Amino acid sequence: MTPLPSGTSGGPLSLYLCGPTPIPGGFVMPFSHLSLAERFWAKVSKTDGCWLWTASRNEKGYGYFAVGRQTTKAHRFAYELFVSPIPIGLTIDHLCRVRNCVNPAHLELVPLRDNILRGVSFTAQNAKVVCCPRGHTYDLFNTVVETKKGNRRSRHCRECRRQSRNRK
């Protein structure tokens, strides 16, 4: 085995990433020369529309980026890097509906409720329903909202309830 040059750690990861780099103290710091923004851009694939995150993603498809000892969602990091800090109480909505997109032009600050209602979840689909199954309008006077166990809320048509009571 050949001896390593003086002033290098020679660990396999450092050799693979950038080769042994001599620095005072004899350690290799592979990414120390890259800024946070450079590390971020190394993980982005720009297209005409979306800027796709190519590094680690969670099971839902959102990208993750390490900042120091913490990880953050890549689209949140991109928004804060290019636009502004994210105020408390607001979340980011992907206008393009591509979860690994980090293009700030495709990201919008909105309250969490708005973000959920813009989506395709069961809650969002149910909120878009404007009439009961029998065709009566859900409005201020014809709607009853009940809170059940676990704060689950459901709405019912007053007219249908009235008709149901009259049939008995």
Image (cartoon, rainbow, N blue to C red):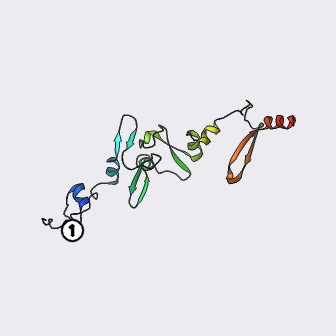
Mark 1: give few (<14), some (14-19) or many (20+) Cα within 10 Å.
some
What residue sits 19% from the left and 65% below the top?
Answer: 8
Q: Is residue 166 left or right of residue 21?
A: right
- The residue furthest top is 135
Name the spot of residue 158 as percent of width and height, x first.
79, 37
The percent coordinates of residue 160 (x first, y second) are: 79, 35
**Foreground residue among 74 and 159:** 159
- Left or right for 99, reference 54: right
| Three-letter amino acid code of the residue under disc 1 | Gly
Picture coordinates of residue 21, whole percent (x, y): 20, 61
The quarter of the picture where residue 27 lies is bottom left
Q: Residue at x 35, y 49 (%)?
A: 40
User: Which residue is tagged 1?
Assistant: 26
The picture quadrant where one finds residue 105 is top left
Vertical relation: 14 (above or below) 59: below
Query: Helix or strand or loop: what does disc 1 sit on?
Result: loop
